[in-house]
Image: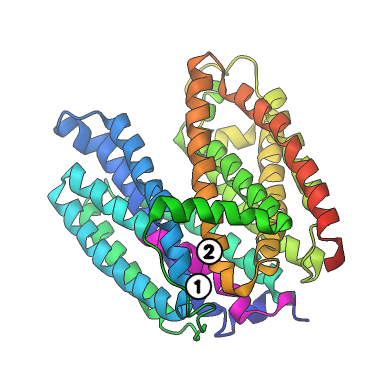
Amino acid sequence: MSHRLLPLLGRRRFAPLFATQFLGAFNDNLYKNALAILVAYRLAEAQELDGPMLVTAAGGLFILPFFLFSATAGQLADRMDKARLIRFVKAAEIAVMGCGAAAFWIGDPALLLGVLFLMGTQSAFFGPLKYGILPDHLRPDELIAGNGLVEMGTFLAILTGTMAGALLVLAPGGIGLVSALVIGLAVAGFLAARAIPPAPAADPGLVVSWNLPAETWRLLRDLRAEPPVGLAVLGISWFWLLGATFLVQFPNYARDHLNADESVVTLFLTLFSVGVGIGSLLCNRLLAGRVRVTFVPLAALLITLCAGDLHFATPAVPPGGAPADWATFAGEAANWRILLDLTGLSLAGGLYVVPLYAVMQTRTAARHRARTVAANNVLNALFMTLSAALAGVLFGHGMTVVELFLGLAAANLWAVGMAVVLGRMTADAR
């Protein structure tokens, strides 16, 4: 059965790539969250800096390279052997993380933020390679499984890396441990990348243009050439807008509406990440390896129902007393509906996004595939940036977090319609 998951994890044409992307995502989130915690709880006060502003700037500096360099990254990925280029990128990560370890020891916020920008640059160049190489090494009936595993690995890496950064950096000896970890993980990622089989250049005669604004616009314009691909990319970007909004707002939601402490935030992050991972793998079982969008409309509808129900499941007035920890919160039957909504929302997210990645890969010409992935990355970054900006504007006008969730649930109905239209466009693939 070619659609089974475990055989892929044991094959060289997939396992080294999976390990490489997992270690890279873990390292990114370990460093980002360690930096945020260090700035917020130690460096900002010690150096009389604006902690929230620095943390916000950190998020912007990490995502900025996706706007600046995705066009170049996509061109290089189509022009060169992707496996070879991955090794270059992972070797660069070792150097960047060496600078990051030095920045932790020096404790200079400007240097830490500069390294974060370099990390974002490295990630921007890795993105088109990660998704662009899958169709080179996997058969069409293995793409759902491969994308599901990659998506699961990404969210578990985000979860574990974020938690590790928060737990370690302020502990005794934490600076040294985090510094050693980020370098060690970068080295491990490079070693894993060395085992990725060759992926010959898709368009070796491509002339790389360094006019970044023009090439970025061209990437986005070219999405119109294949409507199903453009629609799938919009759907993927919408998923990342939703995911970024929920992940960022969990602390405010727990504190302001549930009177819960940071352990409940961790519980929410865990449910969300594991749920997306399980949904991604479940998608492969339901589709039996076939690239279809059969369940995407239903998944989008479930996202709307669960996100909307969070508004109605949340108490109108936060409970009194001391903030609840995760055990107290989960032990209250009244909160099970909230936990069920979050679980359903995340499971539906995995079911929703994995087929869209497969449509993007299979419906794009091989010679242009990495550039299409790069265009997807630009739109993902744009949608996530817009999510933060929009939330800030709405909160400034008095909207609450639960009202934001309800608004997203309503807006997500467009995704239901998008999925129905995409299903009709790709009906011939069935």
Comes first in the chain, label 1 or label 2 = 1
Q: Position of residue 140 (x, y in %)?
A: 72, 76
Q: SS of the residue at dot 1?
A: helix
Above or below: residue 121 compared with residue 83: above
Q: Is residue 370 magenta?
A: no
Q: Which residue is mark 2?
A: 371
Say if 384 sits above or below 368 in the image. Answer: above
Answer left or right for 109 relative to 224. Answer: left
Q: For the residue labelled by badge 2, is the local secondary structure a helix, a strand or a loop?
A: helix
Give coordinates of residue 31: x percent, y percent.
33, 53
Residue 12 makes an appearance in the image: yes
Q: Where is mark 1, residue-wise?
A: 78
* Residue 163 visible within the image: no
**Hey, what amino acid is under mark 1?**
Asp
Decide whether residue 129 is among the magenta residues.
yes
Q: Residue at x 60, y 57 (%)?
A: 222
Q: Are marks 1 and 2 in contact (CB under 8 Å)?
A: yes
Q: CA distance from mark 1 to mark 2?
A: 7 Å
**Protein image colouring:** rainbow
Q: Residues within 10 Å of mark 2 (few under 14, many from 20)?
A: many
Write the start and end of the magenta stretch as one range. Answer: 122-140
Query: 374 left or right of 238?
Result: left
